[in-house]
Amino acid sequence: MGRVTFPERAAEIDLDALRHNIRHLRDVAHPARVMAVVKADAYGHGALPVARAALEAGAAWLGVAHVSEGVALRRAGIEAPILAWLHTARTDFTAGVEHGLDLGISGWELEHVAAAARELERPAIVHLKIDTGLGRNGCPPEQWEALLARAVAHQEEGLIRVVGIFSHLAVADEPARPETDLQVQAFRAAVTAAENAGIDVEVRHLANTPATFSRPDCHFDLVRVGLGIYGLSPFADQASEDLGLRPVMTFSTTVANCKEVPAGQGVSYGYAYRTRKPTTLGLVPVGYADGVPRIATGAPVLVGGRVYPVVGRIAMDQCVIDFGTTGLVGTPASPLGERAVLFGGSDAPPVEDWAAAAQTINYEIVTRISDRVERVYTSREGGDGTGS
């Protein structure tokens, strides 16, 4: 077994691929600008390195869910506009205003943000969110005019500055569905109402990654792209390369053990899998504590240029692959210590294969990779995104 020169468990983040994706999305969205969404630790890729690389490649804005995420980026030296849009009664709006975050407002938060601005004696930067049909966050249409009136009143007091109107799409990943047309119409009406209320709307944003590719009428002034900057496709019938994207994360480890077993050998808890013939089993030292979905039996692992299936139940720290042959153990052909790639770019299995095995979506697979999997940043263009 040769010396292992990479971490035991690694999520390799290709920042050059990320920069490529940002530039490509800028071209697709032009003349609209790009907001790189780096919430949830940049979908598991690392918020700060990704934010820096995205801005280097021409992203104009950053997007996060929580104020705390935006404050962390500010404290790390990020000066670009950052929008945070998901708040609770315990959100530290004072910190958000103090650090110059743009704050998404759906309704109830407005008075809290105004109070924070009054305390700090500086105006809060606000984007008003209209619910155009997703049914989650955002102001209900019947309350929109009242929210506009409250916002204008606070703006006249000098407590807030409304710079944006935004919403979020429900079915843009299914371009043939008519609901997106209805949402676009509702959004345009909300913008018109805001302008009629006396708000000077600087930035209108509606498009997510799928709408950026499939609905140019949704681009407006800014597109909010999350999945796309990580090189993944939001469409069931189009792969990353079909969209001109390069996957950013490669998840790998090493084969921790291998042994020959007879036919009928039970594998892992519950014996949900038994070998059909004498074979060699390989132990892959990642499991659901590392973010590998427990349900994803049958998912692919690349070892030595060939893809093998995960067999038996995935455990907390490990899973098993079946090499399908004997005569490997103790020979130069032994896979012990070989790199095992679960998913990634180039010749590795696509993350969508793991999503299919887990009955979920590619978003969830990359986002759930846990902190005990080391992030390794690679870049040939310049910095690795981790410096100051």
Image: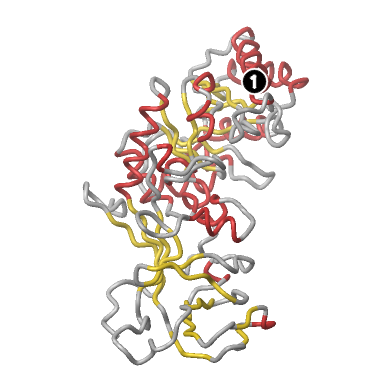
Q: Secondary structure at mark 1?
A: helix
Q: Nearer the viewer, residue 260 or 144?
A: 260
Residue at x-position 39% and y-position 51% = 248
Q: Position of residue 340 (x, y in %)?
A: 40, 71
- Picture quarter containing residue 140? top right
Residue 331 spot, x, y in % from top left? 32, 89
255 and 188: which is toward the camera: 255
Residue 171 relative to residue 222: left or right:
right
Asked if 76 appears above or below 282 in the picture, the reply is above
The image shows residue 380, relative to residue 223, as above or below, that is below
Q: How is the image coloured?
A: secondary structure
Q: Quadrant of the N terminus?
A: bottom left
As drawn, the residue found furthest toward the top would be 196
Q: Horizontal and vertical percent for residue 100?
A: 46, 35
Foreground residue among 227 and 267: 267
Q: In percent of the image, x 51 and y 46: which residue is there?
A: 39
Q: Provide residue 264's location: percent of width, then percent of height.
A: 62, 88
The residue singled out by tag 1 in the image is: 181
Above or below, 306 against 67 in this view is below
Q: Residue drawn 49% across and 42% down?
A: 233
Q: Is 174 drawn above or below residue 334 in the view shown?
A: above
Q: Residues within 10 Å of mark 1 (few under 14, many from 20)?
A: some
Is 379 left or right of 66, judged from the image as shown? left
* Picture quadrant of residue 197: top right
Amino acid on which disc 1 is placed: Asp
142 or 215, which lies in front? Answer: 215
Judged from this view, the residue extending furthest toward the right is: 142
- 219 left or right of 148? left
- Count every numbered label the image shows and give the total: 1
